[in-house]
Amino acid sequence: MPAAPIARAARAAAVSSKVKDVSELLAEVGPLPGNPLPLRVTYDAPCHLVHAQRIVNPPLSVLAAIPGLELIPLRDSEMCCGAAGIYNLIEPETSDAVLEPKLANIAESGAPFVASANPGCLMQIGAGLLRSGSKAKAIHIIDLLDASYGS
């Protein structure tokens, strides 16, 4: 392997060792409980966290720190929503086909909110919910925590 790719790989490893997902940081320090937020929420586990970074529990810990929030299990929550970076832009039909089971599972959960920790997933799921006529809303886990602090 040429020296340049090895050097780039070393720099990338050095940077990634210093970077944390916000949910990891909050779970480590223990988010302060806010005010009660009596909402029913289901959680979509984004691919970048679950499959790439192997981060599973920290986002759930953040949600658990919100008093009054009822976390409804989402069947196959770790399955892709079809956003996959820009995949939803370059392969919209296939992306929509990947999204369909996710939307069905969200509907099955009965939760009026689906929380995720990835902006691409939030846009993909949110657009799918709108197109399907669902009343459910997509929201970032940190926005829920913020709402608890601000209420």
Image (tube, rainbow, N blue to C red):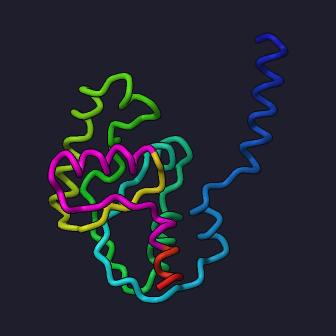
The foreground one among 70 and 57 is: 70
Q: Quadrant of residue 106?
A: bottom left
The foreground one among 78 and 33 is: 33
Image side of residue 6 versus residue 98, left or right: right
Residue 122 vertical placement versus 148 (above, below) = above
Residue 149 vertical placement versus 72 (above, below) = below
Question: x, y percentage for residue 96?
Answer: 24, 34
Confirm whether the magenta stretch covers residue 142. yes
Q: Residue at x 61, y 69 (%)?
A: 26
- The residue range painted magenta reads 120-144
Q: Residue at x 24, y 56 (%)?
A: 75
Q: Residue at x 77, y 42 (%)?
A: 15
Residue 26 vertical placement versus 7 (above, below) = below
Question: x, y percentage for residue 131?
Answer: 20, 45
Confirm whether the magenta stretch covers residue 128. yes
Quadrant of the image containing the N terminus: top right
Q: Residue at x 42, y 88 (%)?
A: 36
Question: x, y percentage for residue 66?
Answer: 46, 80
Magenta segment's dominant SS is helix
Seen as rendered, the residue at the extreme top is: 2
Image side of residue 79 versus residue 112, left or right: right
Q: How many marks?
A: 0
